Amino acid sequence: MCIKDLKFSLWADFIERDFLDNEFKTLIKSKTINGATSNPAIFKNAILNSPAYIDQIKTLGELSPKQKYEAVAIFDIKKAADILRPLYDDKNDGYVSIEVDPFLCDDAEGTISEGKRLFAEIARPNVMIKIPATKAGYIAMEELVASKIPVNATLIFTKEQAVSCAKAFEKGIKKAKSAVDTVISVFVSRVDRAIDAILLENGVEVALSGIYNSADIYNEVQSLGVEKCRTLFASTGVKDDSLEAHYYIQNLLAYNSVNTAPIDTIKAYVENANTEKALPISANMIKAHFEKVAATGIVMDDIYEKQIREGLQAFKDAFKDILENL
């Protein structure tokens, strides 16, 4: 549910062809969502499990597996962009994201080349090129923004990553002499899943670390004030049955932000909609929580580094599975 007064947007973290032709349109018409995101894992589930792709794949003949993947993914991204285009034209987001090949995460030139090529082939202004927040990624982000291509910086777990993304965007804006829309995608629930069992054993409140870390990053991004740049909260589906399905949307509701979530999570939020903002959270409160976390022996920098590494590997594994099956 998009909230204009808060400049808060809700995007569907899901792409699948039958969905785009049906429920996606309903969610847009009801003003529940105003954008969408994708990643290799989402496309893997769609392409390998949905019958909607069989006919197109049969027509792709002798193309390489990656060319087949791109043909299928680009078809869906174009479809989503066209459906969302009236929102974009009305300056109400209307963006859909597509991620570059995750095996290029340490190859700046490769990422730049693929990002520009994908944007040109899709040929829709309301497409964001999704780039992991790595050292090579920051270089690519700057170049794409300088080329006036919207960017979704992804797999962010630390303030240092977020600042590096923001600086890359600023440099790109200076080169282009104009700004494009960008988002800094902070992963939330994965942090809690990584440490909550230890916190529970030590009597520290659980299901807060992901929110507080994200709130800390949000505060930093807001303070930097990069033109047309917002924090996007990702990985906001709930795996713990003790939490309400919309927990990570409700508790990260913030001015000038985006939340991208699974469809069931979005529906749960709409059913229980509370439009009172939950952020910002004070630096002192965030610090106090992580002091309790540190007292259990958890080193958060190690957790974040592991999550970044595992997140990249998960996207690589999903991409590899797609190519092998095609």
Image (cartoon, helix red, strand yellow):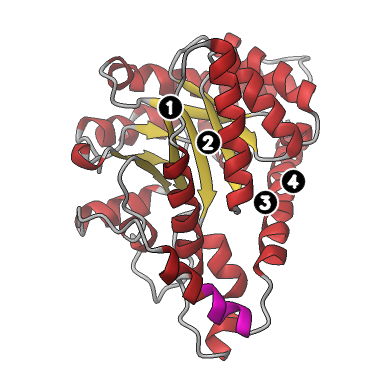
Task: Name the N-terminal-most of marks 2 and 1.
Answer: 2
Q: Is 157 located above or below residue 318 in the figure?
A: below
Per the rendered image, the range of residues in magenta is 290-295
Can residue 317 be seen? yes
Q: In the image, is residue 261 part of the stretch drawn in magenta? A: no
Which circle marks residue 38 in the picture? 2
- Between disc 4 and disc 3, the foreground one is 3
Task: Name the N-terminal-most of marks 4 and 2.
Answer: 2
Which circle marks residue 26 in the picture? none
- Across and down, in percent, residue 59 comes to 64, 14
- Dot 1 amino acid type: Glu
Can residue 13 be seen? no
Task: Name the N-terminal-most of marks 1 and 4.
Answer: 1
Which residue carries the number 1 mark? 227
- Across and down, in percent, residue 296 comes to 63, 85
Q: Quadrant of the N terminus?
A: top left
User: Is the residue marked by circle 3 packed among few (<14), some (14-19), or many (20+) residues within 10 Å?
Assistant: some
Q: Label 4's element?
A: helix
Cβ–Cβ under 8 Å for marks 4 and 3: no
Q: Magenta part mainly helix, strand or loop?
A: helix
Which residue carries the number 3 mark? 311
Q: In which quarter of the image is residue 227?
A: top left
Q: What whole-number distance in Å separates the C-alpha atoms at marks 4 and 2?
A: 15 Å
Q: What whole-number distance in Å separates the C-alpha atoms at marks 2 and 1?
A: 24 Å
